[in-house]
């Protein structure tokens, strides 16, 4: 999956996930958990990884500075966060074999 950040191509996919996983020492499931629990600080890092996966030479500090200047609610940040969440749906295994909740009959 591709998206645009700062007018540059950013890639989300297995190579991106591998870079994040190795760079942050997190499992894929933990990446998603950190995205949900530490959004403000983790999204700019994820954006930097995605930009590098897209072939761009950027540092985490450059992306943090850009987010500081433009805000976490900038359309590029929102678009990236939504694309990331959608891409994670493909890579996070669904819990199978768990019994489904049913209502008791009266």
Image (cartoon, rainbow, N blue to C red):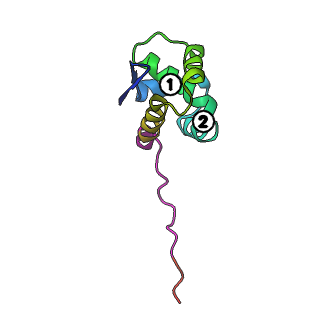
Q: CA separation, marks 2 and 1?
A: 12 Å
Check disc 2 and report its element: helix, strand or loop: helix
Q: Is residue 36 magenta?
A: no
37 is higher (above) or lower (below) than 104: above
Residue 88 is left or right of residue 42, and the answer is: left
Q: Mark 1 points at which residue?
A: 47
Instruction: Specify which label sits upstream in the sequence, 2 or 1.
Output: 2
**Residue 89 falls within the magenta-colored stretch:** yes
Where is residue 74? Give x, y as percent: 50, 30
What residue appears at the point 41 percent right and 28 percent down from the top-left corner? 12
Q: Position of residue 50 (x, y in %)?
A: 46, 23
SS category of the residue bearing label 1: helix
**Which residue is found at the position 50% from the left and 74% from the top?**
102
Q: Residue at x 45, y 25 (%)?
A: 16
Q: Which residue is drawn at 50% across and 24% down?
A: 47
Give the farthest residue toward the top: 57
Residue 21 seen from this side: no
Looking at the rendering, the stretch of residues picked out in magenta corresponds to: 87-102
Number of numbered labels in the structure image: 2
Q: Is residue 93 above or below residue 24?
A: below
Q: As rendered, which of 62 and 29 lies closer to the eye?
A: 62
Could you say which quadrant of the image residue 24 lies in?
A: top right
Residue 67: x and y in percent read: 56, 23
Label 1 crowd (10 A; few <14 / some 14-19 / many >=20): many
Q: In this image, 86 relative to 64: left or right?
A: left
93 above or below 64?
below
Q: Are marks 2 and 1 in contact (CB under 8 Å)?
A: no
Q: Is residue 40 left or right of residue 76?
A: right
For the stretch drawn in magenta, the main secondary structure is loop
Give the residue at mark 2.
Answer: 39
Q: Is residue 35 above or below residue 71?
A: below
Q: Quadrant of the N terminus?
A: top left
């Amino acid at each position: 999956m591709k998206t645009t950040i700062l007018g540059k191509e950013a890639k989300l996919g297995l190579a991106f996930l591998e870079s994040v996983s190795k760079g942050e020492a997190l499992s894929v499931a933990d990446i998603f958990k950190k995205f949900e629990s530490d959004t403000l600080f983790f999204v700019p890092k994820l954006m930097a990884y995605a930009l590098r996966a897209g072939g761009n030479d950027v540092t985490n500090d450059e992306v943090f500075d850009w987010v500081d200047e433009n805000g976490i609610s900038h359309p590029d940040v929102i678009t990236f966060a939504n694309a990331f969440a959608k891409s994670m749906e493909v890579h996070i295994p669904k819990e199978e074999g768990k019994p489904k909740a049913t209502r008791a009959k009266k």
